[in-house]
Structures are given as structure tokens and as C-alpha cells.
Image: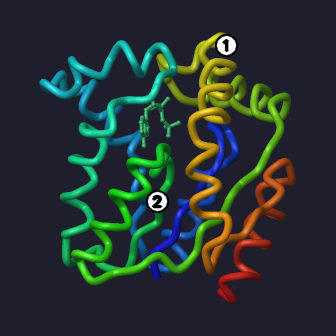
Amino acid sequence: MNLILFGPPGAGKGTQAKFLVKKLNSFQVSTGDMLREEIKKDTEIGKKIINNMNDGKFVEDEIVNKLLEKIIFDSKKKNKLIFDGYPRTLNQAKNLESLLIKSDQKLDYIFFLNVNKNTIIERIEKRKILEERSDDEANTILKRYDIYMTDTKPVLDFYSSKKGFHEIDASLKIEQISNKIDDILKV
Ligand code: AMP
């Protein structure tokens, strides 16, 4: 089973992805983590993306799409993908669709974790204390939310009429969100 966790930063995609990885014996595909790793290792990609990341802007589609390709064609991970933070643009959504077809896979579920701005600000502020994340300054949080809402609208429209699309109220408690997802997945 392949699924997408879709929603603004702070909606709890990462948390739910980790639960699902255990329950479904799957792999979390977090482009955010992959990009942070490139910065940490100070790679060529890392050098190119650091400014955008720190500004809360999206990294170029070309770079993110390239990072994703390796994972899609990894036979160990076939049909065991939990996408967390990808796709974020229409270009990425179309790229994912084409890569899945090429690798003889499909998307089974798309969960839209919908949450309002105030809840997100509270959550990201808490997370900032727990994790050391340079891109999570207060202003950046607001910018990221707004960019997300504008830029990902076409992605939402792309998926909302597809089979397997479910909107979940992500202002609920972690466990309630997870129960709702499990009910749909019947796990
Ligand atoms: P995340 O950990 O998913 O909240 O991502 C943190 C940051 O990484 C975002 O604010 C973007 O700068 C960058 N990023 C992560 N995933 C993507 C993506 N799919 N497309 C473009 N930029 C991304």
C-alpha cells in the first residue's frame, strides 16, 4: 500500500507517518528530512537549498523530484511508501504519478490533514524546543503556512476528486487522528 499524508507544516504528518510505518511495515518518505540531511552533510544540493529552506520557501521541484526517484525505484520499498511532505506542487504530483506508473505502483490513499493556522503555530513552537530546526523561526512558520496554502491548493484540487482521498480534522489529538486513519485503512 502506498499513501500520501498531505497538509500544512505542523499538521502532524511526520507523527502519523511514524505510526503508519510501524503498523504497515512501510517506509516514511520525508522530503523535508532528506533535504535537511543534504544541508547537514554540506553536499552540492545542500548548498543550493539552504537559503530557501531557511526562508521557509519551497525547494525547486527539479531537486526534490530527483531525490525522490531513487526511493520509488528501490525494490525493498515497493508498495510500502508513506509520503510525508511530498508532493507539494502540481509538478511534483504529476511527477509522482508518472514515477509510480513507471515502477508499476499506484497510490491507494491520500489523507489531507487539515488544520487551522493558530493550532499550527502552537505546535511548531513546541516542536522547536524539542528538535533543533533552523527553519522553524516564528516568522518562517507563518510564511511556510501561507506559502503552503497558496502553492498547494492546485495539489489539493488534483487529489480531492481521486479515489482514496480523505480529509481528516488534524486539530484533533494525535491519537484521535491516528484512530481516524486506522479506521479508514482498517488496520
Ligand atoms: P518539512 O519537514 O516537510 O516541513 O519541510 C521543511 C522544508 O523543506 C520546507 O519548508 C521546504 O523548504 C523544504 N521541502 C520539503 N519537502 C519539499 C517539497 N516536496 N518541495 C519543496 N520543498 C520541500
Nearer to us in this view, 92 or 46: 92
**Is residue 61 found left or right of 11 in the rendered image?**
left
Kind of residue at disc 1: Ala
Q: Which mark is residue 150?
A: none
Figure quadrant, ligand 1: top left
Residue at position x 25%, y 37% in the image: 63
Q: Position of residue 125 (x, y in %)?
A: 71, 23
Residue depicted at x 27% and y 25%: 39
Point 39% across, 50% down: residue: 92
Q: Eyeballing the image, is 2 above or below 115?
A: below
Instruction: Residue lying at the far left in this picture: please name it.
Output: 44
Q: Is residue 111 left or right of residue 20?
A: right
Q: Quadrant of residue 76?
A: bottom left
First-in-chain label (2 vs 1)? 2
Residue assigned mark 2: 83
Q: Secondary structure at mark 2?
A: strand
Q: For the C terminus, which image quadrant? A: bottom right
From mark 2 to mark 1, how far is it between C-alphas? 26 Å
Q: Position of residue 43 (x, y in %)?
A: 14, 26
Q: Which residue is mark 1?
A: 138
**Which residue occupies 77% across, 56% down?**
174
